[in-house]
Structure formats: C-alpha cells, structure tokens
Image: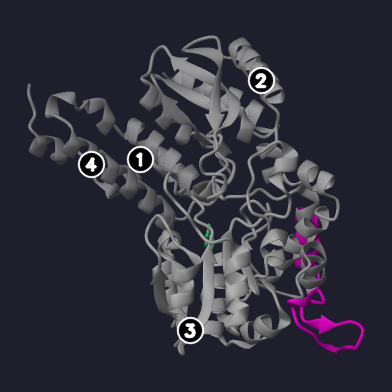
Amino acid sequence: MSLNKKDLFKRIPKVDELLKGERFKRLLKAHTRHTLVEAVRTVLAELREKIDALEPAAVSLDWFTPEAIFLHVEMELSRRAAYHFRRVINATGVVIHTNLGRSLLAGPVLEHMVRVAESYSNLEYDLTEGKRGIRYVHAKRLLCDLTGAEEALVVNNNAGAVLIALNSLAAGKEAVVSRGELVEIGGSFRIPDVMAWSGAVLREVGTTNKTHLFDYERAIGENTGLLLKVHTSNFRLIGFVEQVPGAAVSDLAHRNGLPAMEDLGSGNFIDFRTLGLPSEPTVQEALKQGMDVVTFSGDKLLGGPQAGVILGKKKYIEPIQKNPLNRALRIDKLTLAGLEATLRFYEDPVEAVRQIPTLRMITQSPENLKRKARSLRRRLARDVTEGFQFAVVPSTSRVGGGALPEEALPTYCVAVTPTKLSETELEKHLREADPPVIARVEEGRVLLDVRTLLAKDSADLIRVFSEISHAS
Ligand SMILES: *Cc1c(COP(=O)(O)O)cnc(C)c1O
C-alpha cells in the first residue's frame, strides 16, 4: 500500500483522542491540562513538518502510534521544564565567544555578587555621610588606581559607553575619525551608525589604508567636537598602511583645545608581551598617550561581567555622568559587584592571570593543554567503547572578542571520528545533548578544543558521548 502525503496527514491523531488514553491521563497528575495540550500540539506539529519534508515512502507509520507520540510528549514536557537559558560546554576553543556568553566569572566574584544580591546594600547610600550616594563610586577608586585615570564611570556595555561619550562631548559637532578605523565589530555595532545615533557628525579623514596627522589637522575647524580613535578589533590592516599613533592625535587635539577619545574595544590592563603573547594596547597606555576619554568592555579581555567602562579626565567624564542617557544605560547592581570583585584581582597581575578565567584560558601553555587533551582522550576511550575513535591532535584556538584577531594560539584537541554517524550528525547530537556541547567540525571529525573546557566538563562529555553511542 502506498500512501500519499494527504493520507499521511489524515493519520495524525487528534489531540482530544490522544488525551483520552490512560498514559496521557497519568501525565495530568504532574502537569496542567494547558501545558499537556501545548506539548501534544508541539509534537504533532513536528510530525506534520516531518511528513512535509520527507518523501511519503520515507515516513514510518510507527511514528503515528500513541506510544511513539507519548514518548515525544514526555520529552517535550521535560524540555519545557528545563531552563531555556542554560549552561553549555564550550569546546570551540574561542575564549571570548560572544554567542556563548563571553567571559566566565571567577568563583570569588560570584560569591560577592550573591552576597550583594541576597542582602540590602549600599548601592546608592553613602555610609560615611548617612545619606544618598552614587552607584558609580563603587568601582571608581580601583579603576583610577589601576589605570592612573582621573575619573571613571561605568555603563551597561561598551556600545553604550561609546554612544554616551560621543553624545555628551560631540552632539551637533564633528567627530574626526580615520577611514581606516570606521569598523563594524559584529552584532551590528558599526562606528558610523553609533556616531549617527549619538548626534555627532562623522568627519572621515585619510584613506582606507593610510591616514596622516595632516589629515586630522586639515579637518579641524569651527565645528569640531573631538578627535576619535577606534581599535579595529576583529580586523587588521596590513601592507602599505599607516595610522596616526594615539599620542600624536591627542597632542593635536589639545593644541586645538579639543578632547581626544579612544574606543579600545577589548580593553586590558596587563601587557600581553609579559605573558609571551603578542601586544594588545593597554588601557594605561592609551591614557598615557594623552587620551582624555577611553572606553572598553568589561567582559572581553578584562574578564569581568558585561559593562562599558569610561575612564579619563574629570572635565570630560562629568558631563557624561550628568547626561540623561546615563540613566537609560545604567549599570545594574549585580554587574557593579562583579566588576569591583574582578578589578580587585588586578591589584596583583599574577593573581589576575591565575584567577580570571578568560586570562587563565588564554595563557595556558601548550604542554598543559596537551596533558589535558591526553587525559580527556584516555577517559573517553575507556568509557565510550563503541561508535567513536578518539585521538589527540594539535590545532589552534582564538581569543575572540576582537582581541588578537590575527593570533592563532597553539592548542590541543581531542578529535572524535564517528564510526556510525556523519560528523555533522554528531555535531547536531552534541548540540542537542544535556548540557549542550558546542564543537568545531573539521575534515570528517569533531574537534574538542580543551582550552575552553572546564574541569567539571569532562564527566559530562563522557556521559554525553556514552548516550549518543547507545542511541545510534
Ligand atoms: C566589542 C567592541 C565594542 C562593543 O562593546 P560591547 O561591550 O559589546 O558593547 C565597541 N567597540 C569596539 C572597538 C569593540 O571591539
């Protein structure tokens, strides 16, 4: 008997009929009728989609039985009971992975956040004076001490920091930027667009590959508001190129009575060269070069919670703090607690690298990574005996977050070659596992980069691979 699609659709059971079954009635003890009906509808909709997508001959009538549907409804109910926003295992090796939550917070940072969240706090209360205080003071002293800045302000994220700084200092005036620095960072953050929203008028100078000091000089006039430099983050100009150093730009600004601002993107406090890594501009350097306002993210190389940090001269930070936009971009109390706790590690840079997960992951030695990969491979091979071959292979990982974009960090991966599945099927099974495992597919295998794996991930990985091995 050959059924066409129409016949198949007709065979899909009705919701009411299904719910009369004993099995389904039992589910009503643990779930409301509404939840159960929604779950059944979802499962039937999926069945409909499957019939639609397949040749009728590829559709099995076993899928239509109340037993089969019941199993899917149970799975759907447990999916609905689980958190939608949850932990995943990052096996990509990209440390500051924007889609996977960027920086992880250190244990002591979380403890401080919990302490502040579960009690009342002095968020906006001055304990010395016994009256209303301001929330920005909590991170201010550390930020200024660590960087040499005169004043500090923190907002919701760095996009907000750039927006409010430009709006406060250059609305209705021209902000002068090199054409080589008019970048798009991703997630729709484009310097020209942010500039437009801030009310500042973009004044592009130079060419795509070369900008000289005289380009800035010629652009300065009656209506200039500030000179802006932007870290090109995820992109590098190479070859016949030239940009004007920050010190020369800020010097020119000051000679004309203007502020100079730099958006550092992934601002960091530690000179990466001292860690055997290529140089990334530090926040301290930008300030030393005479930048009046410097902005950067809290959750990129700094390794803290999502925040936008604005540092610089009091004269320019004060109008930013008073801008009504500041209320709209206000940093929340948990973030402030997390930021202060993260910043405290930087009082001792060795401690910062040891404690802050982002820095620890970036600076792991290849020997250490090799040891980690070998240990994971050994455990996987011992406990998952069927369906996969595991091998340790050298590879490269990336920092992410627009930092060190050219740099491939040497790493080691456990390469998984599936024997019963395709590598893309395996990738999908991993992604749909609990916890989901996000991994790279490369040349017929799935790579698990140990750089971004946490200690607690190994046991879960072994369980997930065992489950996939039994199911396939
Ligand atoms: C990442 C980045 C931003 C945006 O920072 P968020 O913290 O994501 O808002 C802005 N400018 C530069 C140069 C960046 O690299």
Q: Is residue 130 left or right of residue 63?
A: right
User: Along the polypeptide, which appears first: circle 2 or circle 1?
Assistant: 1
Height in image: 442 above or below 28? above
Front tag of 2 and 4: 2
Q: Is mark 2 within 8 Å of ligand 1?
A: no
Q: Where is residue 391, by image quadrant?
A: top right
- Marks 1 and 4 sit apart, C-alpha to C-alpha, by 24 Å
3D distance between C-alphas at marks 2 and 1: 55 Å
x and y, in percent, of residue 24 in the image: 40, 42
- Residue 399 x, y percent position in the rendering: 58, 42
Residue 260: image tag: none
Disc 4 secondary structure class: helix
Q: Nearer the viewer, residue 27 or 374?
A: 374
Query: Can you identify the residue that label 2 sits on?
Result: 370
Q: Earlier in the sequence, mark 2 or mark 3?
A: 3
Residue denoted by label 4: 49
Look at label 2 and name its amino acid: Lys
- Kindly indicate the quadrant of the structure image that contains residue 299: bottom right
Give residue 21's mark: 1
Circle nearer the N terminus (2, 4): 4
Residue 282 inside the magenta-drawn segment: no
Cβ atoms under marks 2 and 4 closer than 8 Å: no
Span of residues in magenta: 110-137
Residue 314, image quadrant: bottom right
For label 2, the SS is: helix
Amino acid type of the residue tagged 4 in the rendering: Glu
Q: Please name the amino acid that badge 3 sits on.
A: Thr
